[in-house]
Amino acid sequence: MTSDGILFINGSPRRGRSTSASIIGHMRNLIGDSLRTDVVFATGCDLSDRDLVDSMIGSRIIILVSPLYVDALPSEVLELMRTFEENDLRGISFMAVFNCGFPESSHNSTAISICRNYSAANGMRWLGGLAIGGGGAIDGRPLSANGPERHVVRSLQMVCDSLVEDAPIPEEAFSLASRQFFPVWLYMIVANHQWKTRAKGLGVKKSLKYRPYQ
Ligand SMILES: Cc1cc2nc3c(=O)[nH]c(=O)nc-3n(C[C@H](O)[C@H](O)[C@H](O)COP(=O)(O)O)c2cc1C
C-alpha cells in the first residue's frame, strides 16, 4: 500500500455477499487504476496482524463501508477502529458509508456522527458520511445505473471523482445517496414476506407472534 492508496473497511459480517461489498466493488471499479485500493473485512480479520495496521497507516484515505447495527456500528468494526487508534492517524482522510435496513436513510445519522467524532478525536481529515436507506433492496447484488438505486450510483460517481482528484466531495453527493429509492409500502411487503419465510425455515414462524411480556 502506498501513501496514495485507499483502504476500504467492509464492516459487514456478511463479508463478500453484503450490500457493503456491492458498494465497495462499485467504488473500486469507478476508481480503477487511478488510485491503489485494498479491502479489509472487519469480521474475521486478525487484529494482531501488523501488516493490517501498517496498510491502514500507509493509506491516504480510509473508507468505512458498513451496515447499520442497532443505530450504531457493528461490534467488529468498533474493535477494529479501537485497534487502529492505538496508532498515529493524524493526516489520514476518513469517510464513512452506511447502509441500513429501514427505507429511511436518516437512521444512519448517529453512526455517521460516531465516525465524525472518531475522526476529530484522532486528528484525521473528515471527508463526510453517506447515508443509504433500504439496503435490503440491494442485498449484495451489483449496483446498476438503471436500477432503483441509480441515485446512489450517481452519488458514488461524484465521490470517486473527488477522491481521485483530491477535491472536496460536493454536497449533492450526500443528498443523492440519502434519497429514498424504493417505495416504503413495497419495501415493507417484501421485507415482511422475507422475515416470515426465514422464520418458517427456522421453524419459529408461530413463535414470532408470542407476546411474553404482555
Ligand atoms: C444485528 C442487526 C442489527 C440491525 N440494526 C439495524 C438498525 O438499527 N436500523 C436499520 O435500519 N437496520 C438495521 N439492520 C439491518 C441492516 O443494516 C441491513 O440489513 C443492511 O442492509 C445490511 O447490510 P450488509 O449487507 O452490508 O451487511 C440490522 C441488522 C442486523 C443483523
Image (cartoon, grey):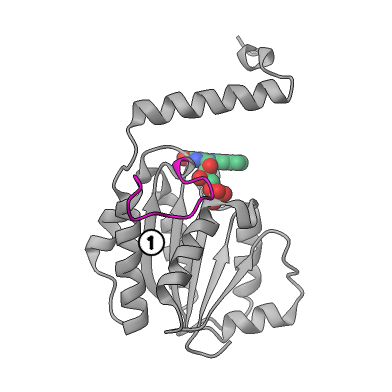
Residue under the image location 48 percent in, 55 percent down: 142
Q: Is residue 124 visible?
A: no
Number of callouts in the render? Answer: 1
Query: Which of the two residues, 23 or 6, is positioned nearer the viewer here?
Result: 23
Residue under the image location 35 percent in, 64 percent down: 156
* Whether the residue under disc 1 has CB within 8 Å of ligand 1: no
Graded by Cα atoms within 10 Å as few (under 14), some (14 to 19) or many (20 or more), the crowding at tag 1 reads many
Task: Classify the position of the N terminus by image quarter.
Answer: bottom right
Q: Image check: 159 left or right of 12?
A: left
Image quadrant of ligand 1 equals top right
Query: Which of the two residues, 49 or 37, is positioned nearer the viewer here?
Result: 37
Residue type, numbered disc 1: Gly
Q: Is residue 202 visible?
A: yes
Magenta segment's dominant SS is: loop
Magenta residues span 137-148
Location of residue 75 in the rendering, given as x and y in whole percent from the top left corner: 64, 53
Task: Classify the position of the C terminus by image quarter.
Answer: top right
**Vertical placement of 164 versus 19: above or below?**
below
Q: Which residue is mark 1?
A: 129
Residue under the image location 34 percent in, 38 percent down: 182
**Vertical placement of 39 versus 75: above or below?**
below
Q: Let me know if residue 143 is in the magenta part.
A: yes
- Residue 186: image quadrant is top left
Location of residue 6 in the rendering, given as x and y in whole percent from the top left corner: 50, 78
Q: Let me know if residue 56 is in the magenta part.
A: no
